[in-house]
Image: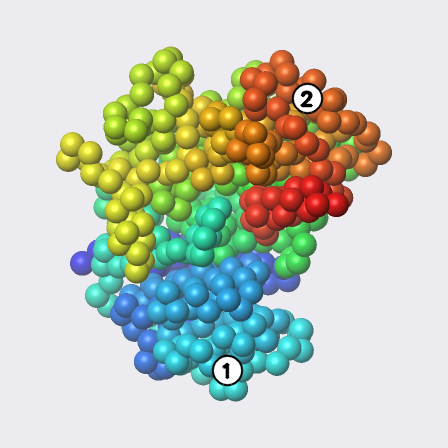
Amino acid sequence: MASFNLSELFERVADAVPERIALVAHDRRVTYAELEARANRLAHHLASAGIGRGDHVGLQLLNGTEYVEGMLACYKLRAVPVNVNYRYVERELEHLFTDADLVGLIFHRRFGPAVAAVVPKIPELRHLMFVEDDSGEAVPDGSIEYESALAAHSADRTFEGRANDDLYLCYTGGTTGMPKGVMWTHEDIFFGALGGGDPTRTSPITAPEQIVERIPETGAVQLVTPPLMHVSGHWSTFATLFAGGRAVYGAPGAWDPAATLDLIQAERANFVTLVGDAMVRPVVDLVLANPDRWDLSSLFVFASGGALCSSTTKELARQALPNVMIIDGYGSTETGVVGNERREPGGAAPSSAHFSVDDRTAVLDDDFKAVAPGSGAVGRLARRGRLPIGYYNDPEKSAATFVEVEGQRWAMSGDFAHVEADGSIVLHGRGSLAINTGGEKVFPEEVEATLLSHPGVQDVLVVGVPDERWGERVVAVVAPRAGASFTLDDLQARCRTELAGYKMPRELVLVEKIQRGPNGKADYRWAKEQALAAQDA
């Protein structure tokens, strides 16, 4: 019986467009038929190692074909791939490997020493595979080389019994605490985050067989810049694959804005996904400074998601790319894709992000009542409909995040927001990051958006530090643009016209570069360390 198992859906697309290029990863280009064959070989190898339904396999990999093959192979066996943040240190890896109940792990050779430090503590982790990367790093004894394993097994498709409710599991670090796994069914994640089989995301399919009918005559090309170990990376990838398109990855290592533009030109990309100001602004600045360097005429959509993209940056993007749609998307691992702000070519820009959402999204107050549009009341953004099952191995957090109100199950995202009179949502920021100063709540992202409008600010994070009088005071950790010079008074003057006085930064800490994760998300713990260190200096 046909199902919405993600590997079955991919197989339908692969059979319909076998010769199309599915993935471009560095020096490798694979067609849909080749990707399907490689995933089958890997699935047969994992099965030969005793891995099957319900078993969890970690993927500690950089972006590449192996990551997608690993996900598909597990799904074919009704096993569960688990994303592993390759930046984690030993303590964090031990927690994730244990909490996720890993029995297998596929990793790039360069991560061999980190894996070797943890494996002896995880007796259940019985099967290790490494992807060669010429790093020369040692790998744990008994590890199997990836390509050799694939070569030893059949490319035939012989998998049965897959189902709509097979488990999709993704670990998210959040802003505080150790990583936690968010559980979805395949059917719910397909409709909640992967496009629902409709390239336009407006009319999802109603039966698995229909996915082939929606494949465009010419597949779109999507440049995926976030790491596949984060949902923004593999959601973009799978949404592209389910539409018969081509997903393109840059070379591993530090992200390079010029290389991103080179890839858009070389691959004739139609869509590019970046993560917030930290990635969007450098790309936009390069285009504005070098208007004739790149041919970007293939580009239809320039999108950001997963982190703050300020109105200033989006306006600059509109100037740099006047014929391209600018999209700021919003969603989370716990809610799926929620909404977006679209700026049509030549369209005017509002002063803050107004996300358009459907009737499955609401802003709820402390009593779980919807706040009135236009009232200015701030509440927590919530989502109903297709939702996760909960957190893996954590019923307490599951109960706090996924709540039932008057017979409806809601995911409480943790983001605070208000609703405009027209029904659009304006985000204030994460409640867990809010700064309490003199009894007033300050959301860092709101202050950051204002500071980013200063011409001398390249990047910024806002944090709270202890204050004897106010409880906490607001500190701006700022990376200036090259050659820029400004004072705290200058930044306060910029804030004064847009923010209440209690929201303005009381201290300025200058750094060479703001530390962010490989997915572009802010590292607020690092920023707070910088702010506290500046106090002690």
Q: Is 117 in front, or is 434?
A: 434
Q: Which corner quadrant of the image does residue 498 belong to?
A: top right
Q: Residue furthest left?
A: 407
- As shown in the figure, which amino acid type bears the numbered disc 1? Ser
Q: Is residue 446 visible?
A: yes
Say which element carries label 1: loop
- Where residue 439 appears, x then y in whole percent? 47, 26
**Which residue shows up at 40% across the image and 46% down it?**
333
**Which residue shows up at 60% across the image and 44% down it?**
528
Indicate left or right for 294 with 92 as reference.
Answer: right
- As shown in the figure, which amino acid type bears the numbered disc 2? Gln
Q: Is residue 323 visible?
A: no
Q: Which residue is mark 2?
A: 492
Q: Residues within 10 Å of mark 2 (few under 14, many from 20)?
A: some
- Where residue 382 appears, x then y in whole percent? 32, 33
Q: Is 475 in front, or is 87?
A: 475
N-term mark: 2 or 1: 1
Q: Is 240 in front, or is 332?
A: 332
Q: Is residue 516 above or below residue 112?
A: above
Q: Residue furthest right?
A: 483
Indicate left or right for 433 with 10 as reference.
Answer: right
Q: Which residue is mark 1?
A: 143
